[in-house]
Image (spheres, rainbow, N blue to C red):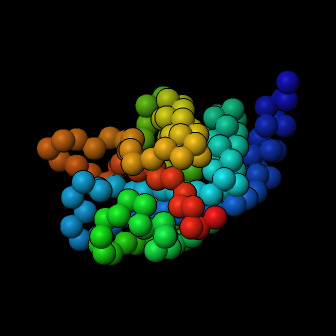
Amino acid sequence: MPTRQAKTAALVHWKQHGTVSVWRYTGNARGFDGWHVTADADGGRSLLALIDLLTEVNDVSLYRTLKVMHPTPAILRVPNHRDTPVIAPARWRLRYAQDHEDWSLVADGDVLECVLGEARMREVRASVEAMLRGDGDFAIGTARKRRPDRHLLWFWWWPKAQS
């Protein structure tokens, strides 16, 4: 079994593979509040590896940042939210939170920072696995029925035309 030091080194040296796209809709986003994510097979596996490392290392001072591709028309046809404009960060930072239930998605300039506790990391991991199986059109997060916020993360399958 790898030591904590070896796991930390693996996290520090983690490199992104594949493509990940993250965006949110502007204007009338009714029913599509929050952030949206999709990834090709390599991007999804790379994201799973990162989530595993963050969870195993369990150090709130460490994070990794993914390069994000602006969603293409083929990607945006999957949720099919018509011609609603989107914004996309250039990078997506994932950070581990000490509180088991923490969940935060905050845009800061061209970076979307996602801070997750262990339970939430497991939720995101299961959602990425589902996305890689071709599932999608579901969200996880903390939005409330009467007052939705942008702390939802939607998962979408990677479009066949994009592969």
In the picture provided, is 22 more to the left or to the right than 47? left
Q: Position of residue 53 (x, y in %)?
A: 70, 39
Front residue (pair 84, 124):
84
Q: Is residue 83 above or below residue 79?
A: below
Q: Is residue 154 above or below residue 121?
A: below
Residue 60 visible somewhere in the drawing: no
Front residue (pair 118, 153):
153
Q: Quadrant of the C terminus?
A: bottom right
Snapshot quadrant of residue 90: bottom right
Q: Position of residue 154 (x, y in %)?
A: 41, 50
In the picture provided, is 11 more to the left or to the right than 72? right
Q: Is residue 90 above or below residue 152?
A: below
Identify the residue at image location x=54%, y=35%: 126
Q: Position of residue 120 (x, y in %)?
A: 48, 35
In the picture provided, is 105 more to the left or to the right than 50? left
Residue ranking furthest to the left: 146
Q: Position of residue 87 (x, y in %)?
A: 40, 72
Identify the residue at image location x=43%, y=37%: 102
Q: Quadrant of the N terminus?
A: top right
In the picture provided, is 12 more to the left or to the right than 52? right
Snapshot quadrant of residue 10: top right
Residue 27 visible somewhere in the drawing: yes
Q: Is residue 57 above or below residue 90?
A: above
Identify the residue at image location x=53%, y=40%: 130
Residue ranking furthest to the front: 161
Total marks in image: 0
Identify the residue at image location x=49%, y=44%: 135
